[in-house]
Image (spheres, rainbow, N blue to C red):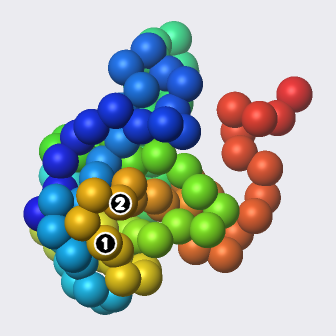
Amino acid sequence: MIEIKTSEVSDGEFNRGVFATCDIKKGVLFHEAPVISYPNDEHPHIEKTLLADYAFEYGINHSAILLGYGMLFNHSYEPNAEYEINFDNHTFDFYAYTDIKAGQEIFINYNGDVDNEDPLWFNQD
């Protein structure tokens, strides 16, 4: 249902993004990314690594590194996907926010909520 390909919007070392391999209807769960969580007081160690830009908030006292394709979605303020934290399964569950066509890149809003237009941490001074 999804694959990793070169993204035109990414300017990272690998220029990767997540793309649909088939049409995905709005509301469909298309990826469950397993979580490796850690206490927030350990985050200063993560801040010293490349993983700092990929960590997600995971409840009040924890952060998380996502497995699967979870850390490879690119950002948009007009996302076509959203995610929900599934604490029972220890996954981040990714759903189509709009209909997504085969071949289209899948975007999430890094701020968590699809309509949150706050500046991103890596664009702030």
Give, as a three-letter code, the residue at label 1: Lys
Number of marks present in the image shown: 2
Q: Quadrant of residue 96?
A: bottom left
Residue at numbered disc 2: 104
Vertical order, 56 against 25 (above or below): above
In the foreground, 61 or 86: 86
Vertical order, 114 against 10 (above or below): below
SS at circle 1: loop
Q: Quadrant of the N terminus?
A: bottom left
Q: Residue at x 30, y 48 (%)?
A: 18
Give, as a three-letter code, the residue at label 2: Gln
SS at circle 2: loop
In the foreground, 45 or 86: 86
In the foreground, 56 or 62: 56
In the foreground, 62 or 81: 81
Q: Residue at x 75, y 64 (%)?
A: 117
The picture places residue 47, in percent across and down from the top left corner, at: 53, 20
Residue at numbered disc 1: 101
Question: Does the residue at mark 1 contact the one at mark 2 (Cβ under 8 Å)?
Answer: yes
